[in-house]
Image: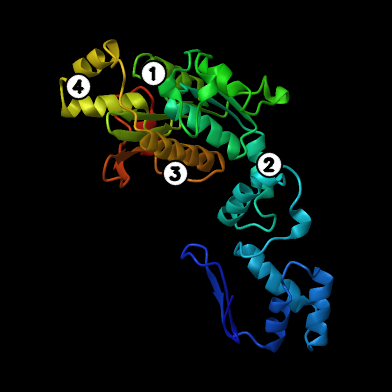
Amino acid sequence: MWRDATTLQVGITPGRALVVGGLGPIETAVLRALDGHNTMATLREIATKAGAEPGVADRLVDMLFSAGAAVDQDQLRGFGSDPQFLPDRASLGLVERCADGGGAAFERRNQRRVDVVGAGRVGATIARLLAAGGIGDVGVDDHTLVTPADVSPGGHPAEAVGLARDRSLGEILPTRTDLADADLDFVVLAPDDDAGTPHVAAGLRHGGVPHLLVRVVETTGVVGPLVVPGSSTCLHCLDLHRTDRDRDWPAVVDQVARKPTTTPPCDASLATAVASMAAGHVLGYLDGYDVASVNGTVDLELPYGLPRRRSWRPHPDCECRGAEASQ
């Protein structure tokens, strides 16, 4: 977009927009020709005909590449070039600010193996979103039968009622036989209740597997903590912090785990919002970025709907050694 005869703007949002001003006739001619139909050779020729050295075109294009404001069409191949993935790859390209439009980063996602433990409304949606985001192998660990209450727009389809949850999603989610023996890159814990979750989380922590707890409790969706074993807050750290503040907390948690609600509240829109946030955090973490649920939880409460982050430091009495790593 041209703001005036000598000022080019690429992008709109504050975090991505690039404004280049003070452009002369030569730079303007080259940039106006950068429309996706001209090769670098053509751009160099345009610069030369305008009276400049060919390198002017290369410097302008490299500037746009480094800012994530342009992509090299010769690199827009490989995994992620399937039309269904193009919007996700384009988004990742903006985050990565790279000339290949996110191609290399998307290919790395295709090499990832992620399991989702618990596939109710929240977990099923997370699994499908991770697949849509390019994760190459998404597994589901949940043999519970799908009920009508599990059916949701982004999760189990109505025709899956009566099937095991893992089977319901098995034909939808991607699997890669070449990754069958590979170590898990990540595990999402999306339990219907708290029974068994501490034990599973402890096993993952001891095994060095990053994991994220996601759930809907009454009218609040909670994403986090995302546990990086040995270097961040773990689930047991949170319990210790809560016990410090409320000595009766362990008794309350124990009773909740032993007496689960027959039909636990799980608003469809809240479950979908929480699942979307969680999937984004998993993808962001696997892509190598900092995400808000490391050393924290993000709460989304009905009806207001504004996410709120709560910070949780590793507890000094926890055996996870996260406190040592944070010093």
| Label 3: element kind | loop
First in sequence: mark 2 vs mark 1: 2
Point out residue 227 in the picture as x, y percentages from the top left corner: 43, 31
Return the residue at label 4. 249
Q: Residues within 10 Å of mark 2 (few under 14, many from 20)?
A: some
Point out residue 236 in the picture as x, y percentages from the top left corner: 33, 23
Q: How is the image coloured?
A: rainbow
Return the residue at label 2. 107
Dot 4 amino acid type: Trp
Real-space CA distance between mark 2 and mark 4, rounded to the nearest whole angstrom: 44 Å
Callouts 1 and 3 close, C-beta under 8 Å: no
First in sequence: mark 1 vs mark 4: 1
| Label 4: element kind | helix
Position of residue 166 relative to residue 280, above or below, is above
Return the residue at label 1. 197
Point out residue 292 in the picture as x, y percentages from the top left corner: 40, 43
Dot 1 amino acid type: Thr
Return the residue at label 3. 291
Task: Name the residue nearer the viewer: 245 or 145.
Answer: 145
| Label 1: element kind | helix
Callouts 2 and 3 close, C-beta under 8 Å: no
Point out residue 139 in the picture as x, y percentages from the top left corner: 58, 23
Real-space CA distance between mark 2 and mark 1, rounded to the nearest whole angstrom: 32 Å
Position of residue 264 relative to residue 112, above or below, is above
Real-space CA distance between mark 1 and mark 4, rounded to the nearest whole angstrom: 16 Å
Real-space CA distance between mark 4 and mark 3, rounded to the nearest whole angstrom: 28 Å
Asked whether, in this view, residue 288 is left or right of residue 57, the answer is left
Dot 3 amino acid type: Val
Task: Name the residue nearer the viewer: 135 or 142.
Answer: 142
Dot 2 amino acid type: Glu
Could you tell me which residue is drawn at 38 percent across and 31 percent down? 322
